[in-house]
Image: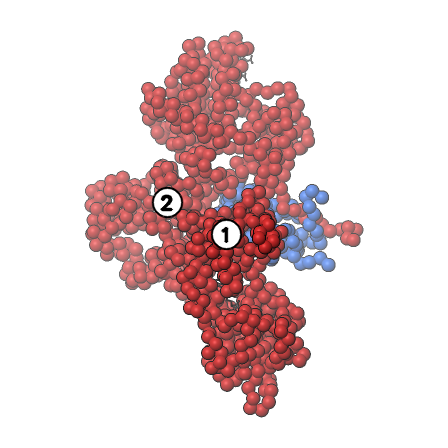
Chain colours: A blue, B red
């Protein structure tokens, strides 16, 4: 059986205050963030402005500043903050037993999926 | 909130006989529940309590003061044996229940005792979580949960020596404090970068860490335990220390594991009750079996498990209400935290992780070590973190729980209850106006309100003017708000805005921040933010990189670069492109290359699929379209051919462009290429306020375009002309001639001195061109010309800094450092049916 949640590994693989990426074959690459206070969030790794990779921005509080043109994006809602208008999809995420789980259907909308090691 | 139906059908075991209530767990929740029931209907039950611990009920949270030697066990007992006796309660202590027979409604204990029940109450609390590392079962590894644990720690402390506490949360820090007071040499190992990260933010966590270190504890944050080390003791193997994943080893005579708790559910689970993380209960604490209730840390209510006592009191009240017929259900609890370490005041409640639309109000007072942060959303307090002054903690917590609208007191909220609820005083200007003339405004410089007012009336019409005239708020800045109020009171709308502050997180300018970092010896980003009263908890994308650079420049070799505070290009040592790929530029000293290097570049371009290969304006070759995961590999290949990072991505020395000079050119006056190579070898790797370009031309024809560089050398027959402050870009600026020198050595020394002057003085993200215009050429000449001593010192400081920065970051990454920055966590692939086995 394929579970509802996709286990993407331990929380500790993301340094607090940074993000790491999860490419999805047939879907959008996902940026998984961990804030300084330890909260985790998953967003499509594309800035609503011009598709900048949000995973590479500077994280402060619950906000990431896009590396391309400095839009500030809320990690909780994916919405641009301040004068800028735009929103990037968020992926439901939960942390359980020190591991991060993403809602499978939000990762790959149509197909069932598995996690493959990059090396594999 | 319906009264649970199960109670109506509650059976009596016999006419007139009380029902039999059996409680499993003689802890805080179990006994409190019994007290609540007795208070409502003392005749209702005949009560038996089983306790695994061989003693009466005591206040578990006070184990910390017992460990610290501030309380004795007798002082923390809640219910003495007389209490059990006088209420007709049989206490069976030291004999845990091992089995619940729901069919026959009996429980069985370890010693074989069988006890029937009509109602069963499970209050088994939590078990400490033991991290599953090798050595976890060694003698000398303890947890911190009950009096036996405290006794073990006290026995160890008697021998003295080293204690390691794994876990820098509430429990761990209280254990560490106790052991430290008992004379042990304590190290706390914490996985996260911030202590108590679930209750504190970075700023408060830093203050706490600094205070604990001041008290002699060693605090290792970001430290992951790999295993526990053993040695041969007098009675066999015992604990010897802890090894971290980074290889460090810390000796230990005792290790306290305090990394968290898990609801104690084994018994409930074995008896077939609904159990998720905890024993699942409804609003009246009834489990999936109507005859069985559960309360305390072992339960899960509306999806939440709790690890603090306050929720237990609410749960016990609802439980007793339900049992005795009144229908007040439990609706969950909001919790607040205090750390019980004497001399450290710390309070935290609610949500302070910065949710959307939430606004932070921050007040810092460095002189008194105070940090206060109140989080407001839609005019309600939703969270608070207080360090150093927790007097208003309960008030904020009250506002938070009640959800009171605080718009009327918003301006004064952060100053606390006394101030905010003072009617007219809720307007900070009015409050300041009400102060007497001799009230002290600036504690650092001892400036009274009267003096500040006199200074404003005397013509100081901006914050900056006040700072420079009477020094108020010129040091730590915590009184900035008061001075601004005074300006507003005296001048109304006439207040002049001062020079631009570093960013919206601070009232200080770049210059102030740079000066104060040196004056106060500030050595980390959180420390700087605290001491300089940052108004945001973690800063922003503007100030974090600036502070990182200022600290790096101020404390070479000492400050540890904060990668999180670097722009992506400097974090990944490559330039991000608009499609999210990167470009890679290897260093070519002075613009020279070799066939071998070119071959390696060509191979790399093919191997890693560079879609564009371009010769840059700085005489380098740029490979475009490289993926971040491939960066370490392409760097390894380029390293193998002898090339290092070109720093084309950094606020750093970029390139030294040269012309062919006297070696080949018929006009050449000096060896411009050779000098360029020497300069580049001297300056590469240095971090700067902004990018920095150098060029060396062999004669005034200036083919290397030295007069639009940050530092340019134009060779002439009699020596070298040194030019500064040039820039291409949007506003082209030709250089100013700084001076002419006769030898290469002099040119090199002046180059180093000029760079260091720029590094130490300019604002972050200020190129040399605007910097030279802001400071004036005369100021720069004043520092560098006719002042050989200062030039020598500046150059010496540059060379010291270079000792620490001339490390090829590509080689480090190619060698496997910080692989997490380059690799994906994993990959998701569609699951095709044919792949399913
Ligand atoms: C050192 C320390 C400091 C703390 N400080 C604070 C603080 O400052 N503020 C705060 O809010 N909270 C604090 N806590 C947490 C607080 O103590 C707990 O929330 C509270 O004790 C939980 O009550 P409980 O009844 O659910 O569990 P417990 O008090 O642990 O009671 C459970 C009891 O059940 C017994 N038991 C378990 N299984 C069985 C069985 N099968 N048969 C019989 N008996 C069994 C256990 O031995 C235990 O005595 C602290 C905890 C510790 C350990
Ligand atoms: C009086 C005017 C100039 C003369 C006589 C002159 C002459 C020369 C000569 C002889 C070379 C030698 C090249 C070689 O053999 O490799 C050269 C190179 C070059 N010149 Fe000029 N030049 C002049 C002005 C300029 C100017 C104004 C520029 C650009 C702003 C310029 C840009 C270059 C460049 C980029 C090179 C190649 C440098 C190198 O990489 O080695 N030249 N020039
Ligand atoms: S700057 Fe002078 S020496 Fe250098 S290449 Fe041009 S003409 Fe020759
Ligand atoms: S792409 Fe993110 S700000 Fe432009």
> From the viewer's perspective, is residue A42 above or below residue B718?
below
Camera sees residue B773: yes
Q: Is residue B764 above or below residue B359?
A: above
Q: Which percent across, then down, holds residue B555?
A: 42, 35
Residue B282 can be seen in this image: no
Q: Residue, x 53% and y 43% (percent of image)?
A: A57
Q: Of circles 2 and 1, which is in front?
A: 1
The mark that comes first in sequence, 2 or 1, is 1
The image shows residue B806 at horizontal and vertical percentages of 51, 29
Query: In this view of the protein, which residue sits in the foreground, B154 or B592?
Result: B154
Q: Secondary structure at mark 1?
A: strand
- Give me the residue at 28% from left, 54% from top: B429
Mark 2 falls on what kind of element? Answer: loop
Q: Residues within 10 Å of mark 1 (few under 14, many from 20)?
A: many
Badge 1 is on which residue?
Answer: B163
**Within-10-Å neighbours for mark 2: few <14, some 14–19, many 20+:** many
Among the 4 quarters of the image, the one containing residue B527: top left
Residue A81 spot, x, y in % from top left: 48, 49
In the rendered view, would you say B505 is above or below B59? above
Mark 2 chain: B
Q: Which residue, given by chain and number where applicable, does mark 2 sit on?
A: B532
Q: Nearer the viewer, residue A44 or B398?
A: B398
Q: CA distance from mark 2 to mark 1?
A: 35 Å
Q: Residue furthest front?
A: B234
Q: Position of residue A111 (x, y in %)?
A: 71, 53
State the residue at coordinates (37%, 45%).
B531
Determine whether, in the image, residue B198 is placed left or right of residue A45. left
Marks 1 and 2: in contact by CB < 8 Å?
Answer: no
Residue B211 horizontal side relative to residue A13, left or right: left
Q: Name the residue at 77% across, 53% down.
A: B836
Q: Cβ of disc 1 within 8 Å of ligand 1?
A: no
């Amino acid at each position: 059986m394929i579970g509802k949640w996709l286990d993407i590994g331990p929380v500790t693989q993301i340094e607090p205050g940074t993000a790491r990426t999860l490419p999805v074959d047939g879907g959008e690459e996902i940026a998984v963030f961990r804030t300084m206070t330890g909260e985790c969030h998953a967003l499509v790794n594309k800035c609503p402005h011009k598709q900048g990779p949000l995973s590479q921005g500077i994280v402060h509080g619950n906000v990431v500043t896009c590396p391309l043109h400095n839009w500030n994006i809320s990690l909780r809602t994916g919405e641009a903050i301040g004068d800028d208008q735009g929103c990037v999809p968020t992926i439901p995420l939960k942390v359980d037993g020190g591991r991060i789980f993403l809602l499978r259907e939000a990762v790959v909308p149509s197909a069932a999926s598995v996690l493959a090691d990059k090396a594999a | 909130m319906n009264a649970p139906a199960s109670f109506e059908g509650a059976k009596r075991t016999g006419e007139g006989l009380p029902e039999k209530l059996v409680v499993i767990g003689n802890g805080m929740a179990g006994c409190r529940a019994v007290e609540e029931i007795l208070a409502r209907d003392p005749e209702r039950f005949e009560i038996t309590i089983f306790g695994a611990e061989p003693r009466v009920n005591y206040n578990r949270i006070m184990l910390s003061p017992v460990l610290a030697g501030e309380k004795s066990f007798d002082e923390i007992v809640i219910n003495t044996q007389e209490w059990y006796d006088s209420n007709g309660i049989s206490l069976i202590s030291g004999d845990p229940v091992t089995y619940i027979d729901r069919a026959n409604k009996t429980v069985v204990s370890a010693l074989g005792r069988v006890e029937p029940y009509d109602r069963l109450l499970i209050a088994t609390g939590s078990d400490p979580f033991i991290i599953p590392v090798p050595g976890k079962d060694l003698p000398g590894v303890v947890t911190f949960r009950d009096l036996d644990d405290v006794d073990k720690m006290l026995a160890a402390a008697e021998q003295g020596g080293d204690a390691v506490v794994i876990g820098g949360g509430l429990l761990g820090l209280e254990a560490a404090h106790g052991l430290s007071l008992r004379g042990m040499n304590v190290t706390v190992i914490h996985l996260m970068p911030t202590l108590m990260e679930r209750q504190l933010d970075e700023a408060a966590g830093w203050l706490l860490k600094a205070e604990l270190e001041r008290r002699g504890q060693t605090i290792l944050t970001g430290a992951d335990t790999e295993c526990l080390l053993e040695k041969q003791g007098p009675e066999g193997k015992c604990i010897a220390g802890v090894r971290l994943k980074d290889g460090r080893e810390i000796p230990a005579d005792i290790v306290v594991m305090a990394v968290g708790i898990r609801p104690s559910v084994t018994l409930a689970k074995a008896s077939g009750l609904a159990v998720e993380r905890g024993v699942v209960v409804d609003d009246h604490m009834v489990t999936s079996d109507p005859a069985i209730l559960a309360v305390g840390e072992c339960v899960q209510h509306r999806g939440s498990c709790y690890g603090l006592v306050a929720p237990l009191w609410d749960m016990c009240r609802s439980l007793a209400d339900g049992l005795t017929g009144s229908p007040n259900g439990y609706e969950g609890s909001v919790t607040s935290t205090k750390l019980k370490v004497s001399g450290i005041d710390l309070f935290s409640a609610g949500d302070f992780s910065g949710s959307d639309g939430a606004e932070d109000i921050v007040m810092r007072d460095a002189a008194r070590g105070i940090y206060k942060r109140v989080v407001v959303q839609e005019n309600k307090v939703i969270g608070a973190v207080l360090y150093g002054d927790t007097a208003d903690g309960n008030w904020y917590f009250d506002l938070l729980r009640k959800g009171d609208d605080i718009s009327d007191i918003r301006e004064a909220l952060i100053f606390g209850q006394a101030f905010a609820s003072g009617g007219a005083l809720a307007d900070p200007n009015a409050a300041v106006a009400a102060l007497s003339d001799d009230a002290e405004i600036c504690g650092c410089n001892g400036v009274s309100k009267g003096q500040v007012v006199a200074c404003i009336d005397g013509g100081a019409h901006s914050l900056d003017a006040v700072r420079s005239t009477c020094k108020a708020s010129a040091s730590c800045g915590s009184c900035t708000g008061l001075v601004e109020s005074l300006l507003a009171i005296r001048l109304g709308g006439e207040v002049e805005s001062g020079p631009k502050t570093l960013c919206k997180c601070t009232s200080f300018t770049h210059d102030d921040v740079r000066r104060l970092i040196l004056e106060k010896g500030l050595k980390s980003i959180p420390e700087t933010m605290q001491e300089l009263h940052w108004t945001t908890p973690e800063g922003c994308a503007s100030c974090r990189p600036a502070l990182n650079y200022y600290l790096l420049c101020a404390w070479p070799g000492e400050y540890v670069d904060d990668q999180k505070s670097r722009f992506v290009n400097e974090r990944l040592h490559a330039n991000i492109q608009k499609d999210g790929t990167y470009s890679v530029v290897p260093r070519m000293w002075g613009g020279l290359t070799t066939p071998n290097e070119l071959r390696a570049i060509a191979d790399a371009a093919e191997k890693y699929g560079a879609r564009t290969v371009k010769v840059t304006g700085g005489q380098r070759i740029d490979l475009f379209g490289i993926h971040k995961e491939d960066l370490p590999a392409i760097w390894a290949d380029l390293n193998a051919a002898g090339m290092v990072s070109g720093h084309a991505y950094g606020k750093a020395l970029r390139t030294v462009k040269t012309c062919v000079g006297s070696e080949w050119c018929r006009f050449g006056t000096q060896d411009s290429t050779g000098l360029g190579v020497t300069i580049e070898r001297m300056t590469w790797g240095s971090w700067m306020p902004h990018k920095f370009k150098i060029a060396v031309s062999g004669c005034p024809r200036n083919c290397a375009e030295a007069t639009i560089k940050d530092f340019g050398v134009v060779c002439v027959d009699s020596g070298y002309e040194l030019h500064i402050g040039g820039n291409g870009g949007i506003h082209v600026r030709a250089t100013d001639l700084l001076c002419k020198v006769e030898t290469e050595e002099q040119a090199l020394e002046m180059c180093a001195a000029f760079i260091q002057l720029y590094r130490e003085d300019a604002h972050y993200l200020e190129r040399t061109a605007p910097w030279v215009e802001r400071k004036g050429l005369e100021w720069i000449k004043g520092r560098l010309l006719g002042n050989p001593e200062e030039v020598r010192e500046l150059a010496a400081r540059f060379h010291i800094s270079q000792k620490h920065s001339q490390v090829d970051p590509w080689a480090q990454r190619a060698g496997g450092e910080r692989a997490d920055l380059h690799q994906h966590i994993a990959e998701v692939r569609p699951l095709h049916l044919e792949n399913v086995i």
